[in-house]
Amino acid sequence: MISNLSVELRWFFNGIVPADVQDWFANQLPGNKPLQEKSRKDLYFIVRDREDLGLKISRGTLELKWRQDSQPFSLSEPRIIGVQETWIKEKWRYAKEYANNLEMAFGKPNLKGWRAEVQKTRSIRKHKVDTSGNVIDLAIDETAVRLLKIELTSLTKHDRPWWTFAIELSGEPQNLHEILAGAVKKILNGHPQLDLHADHSYGYPQWLAHSN
């Protein structure tokens, strides 16, 4: 079992990722080129009226996330407004030879309990961050005391396209919120016209519960 504490800013948008956002993420952000992950399908279990809990089957694991804290986030320059959420993640890995049977069993239509399949194609950048919020390239296979992930993901739910942009900082819990704010200010300075406002900012459990 793997435990992980993280602070996350996330925004969701209807439709496909705009071309200027794709170009900005792929070519204009500082650091190494982003990693383009293999497209995958995650199976989410939706807990009614609990936007602080996320449960899914993904990539050979059962993953549980529960929110510890949620608070407003804002920067004046660049202008960014969102919701900053603190999550704890727990993962249980299962044997790959049983993956298809497990996912087929839980993914079968008309079973009791709300659930949703979400197709994801994710690009991700990984950096380490110092206590002042300075973002530093992460070498291959290098570990970091504080790991920063910048994510741009295309989503399909119920045959409808969505996309999400997120910044997540994990690691030692001391001052994570302040360090994240410093990193966000440096990273998003000069970002394209992303609509980074509070109305679009929430975690996956809320998006799953309220998006069609």
Image (spheres, rainbow, N blue to C red):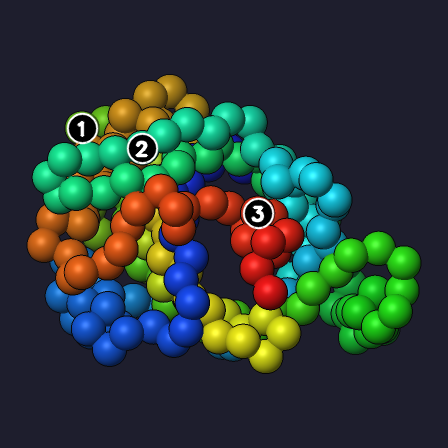
For label 1, the crowd category at 10 Å Cα-Cα, with few meaning under 14, some 14 to 19 and many 20 or more, is: few
- Give the residue pinned by disc 3: 206
In front of the other: label 3 or label 1?
Answer: 3
Q: Are marks 2 and 1 in contact (CB under 8 Å)?
A: no
Quote the CA–CA distance across marks 2 and 1. Answer: 18 Å
Q: Name which quarter of the figure residue 157 lies in.
A: bottom right
Task: Tell me: residue 47, above or below residue 195.
Answer: above
Q: Residue at x 28, y 50 (%)?
A: 196
Q: Name which quarter of the figure residue 80 lies in.
A: top left
- Give the residue pinned by disc 1: 132
In front of the other: label 2 or label 1?
Answer: 2
* Sequence-wise first label, 2 or 3: 2
Residue nearer the viewer, 28 or 51: 51
For label 2, the crowd category at 10 Å Cα-Cα, with few meaning under 14, some 14 to 19 and many 20 or more, is: some
Q: Tell me residue 77's x, y (percent).
A: 11, 39
Q: Amino acid at mark 3?
A: Gln
Q: Tell me residue 72's x, y (percent).
A: 36, 30
Judge left or right: residue 195 versus residue 106: left
Asked if residue 57 shows in the view, the reply is: no
Mark carried by residue 73: 2
Q: Residue at x 35, y 42 (%)?
A: 198
Q: Tell me residue 128's x, y (percent).
A: 28, 43
Quote the CA–CA distance across marks 2 and 3. Answer: 17 Å
* Sequence-wise first label, 2 or 1: 2
